[in-house]
Every structure is written in C-alpha cells, then in structure tokens.
Amino acid sequence: MAARALWKGQLRLSLVSIPVELFSATRRASKISFRQIHQPSGKRVRYEKTVAGIGPIDTDDIVKGYEVGDDEYILLDPDEIDAVKLETKKTLELVQFVGACEISPIYFDKPYYLVPTDDLAEDAYRVVRDALRASDKVGIGQIILRGKEYLAAIRPCGDGLLLETLHYADELRDAEPMFNEIKDAKTDKELLEVATTLIDRKTAPFDAASYSDSYAEALRDLLEAKQKNKKTPRVSTSDDSWGGKGENVVDLMAALKESVKTTEKKKPKRKAS
C-alpha cells in the first residue's frame, strides 16, 4: 500500500515557497497487537463513550472542555478551535539555521520524510537540500500536525530532506533533580582504563539492520506454536453486533537573491509566552 501524506503545504525560505508533502519515516506494521476478550463469553471488550446517569452517547454531542476550576469547564465547539487560524497549518517557514550538531538529542521527537509534491518543485527543493548540506546547517521552523504545533528541524537525508519534530523547552523535565543524588566522586583510574579499553574493542560503525526486536520475534514464535496447537483455546467474535461511526515555484534565482537583500541579520522572533 502506498504511503499516505500526513501533511501537505509549503516549505518557505524567505521569498521561495516549495510545495511539499510529509510522510512518516517510521512504521508499526511489524508490531504485534492484541485485543481484549471477555473470557466467559468469548466476546471482544468494547469501549463506549458514556455519561454517568445517561449511558452511551452520540459522538456528535461531544465538545471539548477546558477545566478552569473544580468540576468547572469552559466548553468549546470543534469549529471554534478550527477557526484559530495559524499559518503553520499550511506553511513551514525556515526562520533560523543552526549547526547540525548544536541540537541536543533530548529535543528530538519523531522523524518524517519531506518530499516535493511534483516535478516543478524539485529544482527549488534540491537547492535547499544542497545548501543545508554544504553549510552543515539544520533549518528550524514550526508545523501543525494532528492539531498541535511542533517545533521542527529540517536536514538533508540521502537524496531528500528529513523533518524531525522537536520538544519545546518547557516539555522537558529538568535533569538535575534526577541526578543530584549521584555523588561527585573521582572515578577509579584502573577501572576507567578497563572500561575505556572495552569500549574501544566494541566500537564499530552503527548499523541498525544488525539489530532486531528479540521480544517480538519470541512472541511471534509463541503465537505460531499456539496457532498450530489444536488444544489452544479459541473464540469466534464474528457474531458481535458492532457499528462504528501546486502551485508553480517562483523564479528561484530571483527569489533567492531578493531574499538575501531583504533578510536582516537578526535572531528570529520568539513567541510571547
């Protein structure tokens, strides 16, 4: 099955706008999932939206509530939330560039592939990719995915661009309380030499393909054996009654030259907190 774009919009570098699409760089197809079964009846466990004293409710009657006090909520209709227009819904503007190694790994969240939507977008796309590669820089911008605005880093990846969502600073816990009980004692010199020697001997180029999920493999073996075993308890849930509810790229050279003229050497504006 062909991958489905999670986001479509414009990658903007000053006056240059490039039509792009975003695809997840990870997949969960190999993950094993289970369903909960009510053993006495052999039926699947369902999760219904209910209200105390009323019972099951229609999903069309659900709105979002923001708690402002004990059991007191401000109610918001989905249309009211959608009406909060943010440019980052359809535009990913590169507002800053940083050294490729300047961002601490703790900030990285999830990777995505950022690709041009059509042949007309490829020229400008390649220029941005090659410029980032030549300068050894990462572009920083913001993008809205699944109703949330993310900080994002754009970097070259093979023939294309990789977008990695980043955590905001206020989303990270302070490490100091976690580590403050680790005593600041001097490491034994001999033990340090042995550990360093061991690390040197086990050092090799990273190859993710050389690792596999041994737990998932063992679980698949168990499931295969259980499936072949005629004594394995089985139920049929088939009788359950259940219903559920490009635009053209601008003249690239002219736009880039004009962008250089108009771009001031200053830090990007930060959002008011």
Image (cartoon, rainbow, N blue to C red):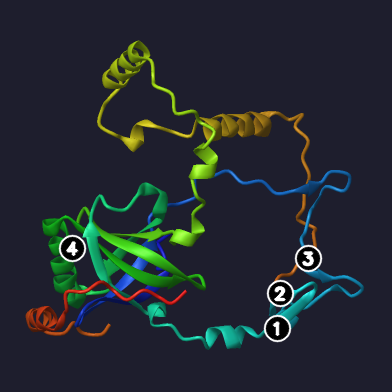
Cα separation, mark 4 vs mark 3, equals 47 Å
Q: Residue at x 68, y 31 (%)?
A: 226
* Residue annotated with mark 4: 129
Q: Residue at x 28, y 62 (%)?
A: 154
Q: Residue at x 54, y 40 (%)?
A: 178
Q: Give the number of the mark in front: 1 or 4.
A: 1
Q: Give the number of the mark in front: 3 or 1.
A: 1
Earlier-in-chain disc, 4 versus 2: 2
Q: Is residue 242 above or below residue 269?
A: above
Residue farthest along the top direction in this orientation: 190
| Amino acid type of the residue that numbered disc 2 sits on in the rendered structure | Glu
* Residue annotated with mark 2: 67
**Residue 48: where, in percent of width, then height?**
78, 65
Earlier-in-chain disc, 3 versus 1: 3
* Residue annotated with mark 1: 75
Q: Say if residue 191 shows up in the picture.
A: yes
Q: Give the number of the mark in front: 1 or 2.
A: 2
| Amino acid type of the residue that numbered disc 1 sits on in the rendered structure | Leu
Q: Is residue 134 above or below residue 249?
A: above
Q: Is residue 41 above or below residue 121?
A: above
| Amino acid type of the residue that numbered disc 4 sits on in the rendered structure | Arg
Are the residues at dot 3 and dot 1 in contact (C-beta closer than 8 Å)?
Answer: no
Earlier-in-chain disc, 2 versus 3: 3
Write down the quadrant of residue 130 in the picture. bottom left
Residue 48: mark = 3
**Residue 216: where, in percent of width, then height?**
54, 35
| Amino acid type of the residue that numbered disc 3 sits on in the rendered structure | Glu
Cα separation, mark 1 vs mark 2, equals 9 Å
Cα separation, mark 2 vs mark 3, equals 23 Å
**In this view of the protein, which residue sits in the foreground, 178 or 51?**
178
Category of crowding for the residue at label 4, using alpha-carbon neighbours closer than 10 angstroms: few (below 14), some (14–19), many (at least 20)? many
Q: Circle 1 sits in a helix, a strand or a loop, which is it?
A: strand
